[in-house]
Image (spheres, rainbow, N blue to C red):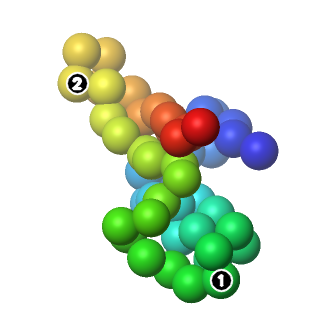
Amino acid sequence: MYDPERCIGCRRCETACTVRNDGKGSARVVRVKVSRNLNYKTLGVGVDS
C-alpha cells in the first residue's frame, strides 16, 4: 500500500517489493519505482503491470 504523505524517497519500498515477489533484492527487476516529479517537486510511485 502506498501513502504519498509518508513517502520520503528512500526507495525501500522498491527493495521490499522485489524481495517479497522475487525472493531477492535486485534493482534490475523492481516492480515499483519511486521517482521525483520535477515540475511539482513531489515524489510518486509507478507500478509496472
Element type where label 1 sits in the image: loop
Residue appearing at x 38%, y 69% in the figure: 27
Of callouts 1 and 2, the N-terminal one: 1
User: Under tag 2, what secondary structure?
Assistant: loop
Q: Which part of the image, by quadrant, shows the C terminus?
A: top right
The answer to which of 22 and 35 lies nearer the viewer is: 22
Residue 36 falls left or right of residue 8: left
Task: Tell me the quadrant of the picture where the N terminus can be found.
Answer: top right
Residue 33: tell me if it is visible.
Answer: yes
User: What residue lies at 69% left-to-right and 68% top-to-bottom?
Assistant: 21
Task: Give the residue type that dot 1 points to.
Answer: Gly
| Amino acid beneath label 2 | Leu
- Give how far across and how far down residue 39 sits, in percent: 24, 15
Indicate the position of residue 5 as horizontal and vertical percent values: 62, 34
Residue position for label 1: 23
Residue at position x 44%, y 64% from top?
29
Label 2 Cα crowd, 10 Å radius (few <14 / some 14-19 / many 20+):
few
Mark 1, other Cα within 10 Å: few <14 / some 14–19 / many ≥20? few
Q: Is residue 36 left or right of residue 6?
A: left
Placement of 22 over or under 10, stated as above or below:
below
Work out how far the residue at label 1 is from the one at label 2, CA to CA, in angstroms: 32 Å
27 on left or right of 2: left
Say whether residue 12 is visible: no
Contact between marks 1 and 2 (CB within 8 A): the answer is no
**Image coords of residue 48 (percent x, y):** 53, 41
List x then y, in percent, for residue 20: 71, 72
Circle on res. 12: none
Image vertical order of residue 1 relative to residue 4, above or below: below
Front one among 49 and 34: 49
Q: Which disc is residue 38 wearing?
A: 2
Q: Residue at x 69, y 38 (%)?
A: 3
Residue mark closest to the camera, 1 vs 2:
1
